[in-house]
Amino acid sequence: MIKVVSFEICPFVQRVTGALAAKNIPYEIEYINLKNKPQWFLDISPNGQVPILITESGKTLFESDAIIEYIEDEYGAIEPDVSNEQRALDKAWSYLGAKHYLAQCSAMSSKDQSTFEQRTSKLMKAFAKVEAVLNQDNLFFKSNELSNVDIAWLPLLHRAAIVERYTGFDFLSGFPKVKWWQKAIMNLGIVEKTVSSDFEKRFKDFYLTNTYLADGNNVDQVDGCGTTNCCG
Ligand SMILES: N[C@@H](CCC(=O)N[C@@H](CS)C(=O)NCC(=O)O)C(=O)O
């Protein structure tokens, strides 16, 4: 069976588990502590990052973009019969989503209002681009069928929903079509399969404790996330 090596709150891992869940592909998962990476992981992970995916034949794949392509090539596309042109567009929209994972992580980790607003504005620009192309007659990004683009944006939309539930702050405020899309993704029945059972607690402990989002006012700048390695 294939194996995914993970860190509980990593959005790049969630994209991979999302692709596996969407195709109903069974897999083992092992969680590691990124602050104290085990030697066996360092030995096989060229970039020292999660996710890695160990294939049935024992090869270690790394970089979530490459892993997503492997899942599609090996197990079939989530959405069949996509033209080359459309596939290129899907990859580009997926890239735009994944490129903002760290922006969301760092926004959520902000310790004061101005840092929070500055980091959030980057994310808002991406949601505004999506708002402009979403069609309100569709459930998902392109149609009523799930696609890779939905999976790539799932971590952002899921995390926005949790933040809203706990803090009242809505990253999607002002983007009604994105909001509708978020609802469709959250109702899909696969979101809970993409994360561990204690995900919400871990997420809350990390992002909604001693942060601007948690307290609504400035808190001490302690051990904040960097911009490149947010959830580690
Ligand atoms: N480009 C990588 C990014 C993965 C990444 O940033 N993973 C973080 C956790 S969310 C990580 O492993 N951080 C530990 C480190 O960089 O040392 C991918 O797409 O797989």
Image: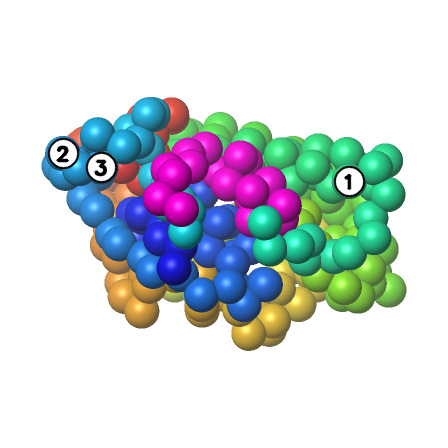
Query: Quick check: is 69 in the magenta stretch?
Result: yes
State the quadrant of the C terminus: top left
Magenta-tinted stretch: 57-73
Residue nearest the viewer, comparing 42 with 231 = 42
Residue nearest the viewer, comparing 118 with 100 = 100
Q: Residue furthest front?
A: 57
> Is the CB of mark 1 within 8 Å of ligand 1?
no
What is the distance, in whole Å, between disc 1 and disc 2 at their CAs? 38 Å
Q: Is residue 81 visible?
A: yes
State the quadrant of the N terminus: bottom left
Which amino acid does the dot numbered 3 rest on?
Answer: Phe
Q: Which label was assigned to residue 39? A: 2
Query: Quick check: is 149 in the magenta stretch?
Result: no
What is the distance, in whole Å, between disc 3 and disc 2 at their CAs? 5 Å
Q: Which residue is mark 3?
A: 41
What is the distance, in whole Å, between disc 3 and disc 1 at their CAs? 33 Å
Q: Which residue is mark 1?
A: 87
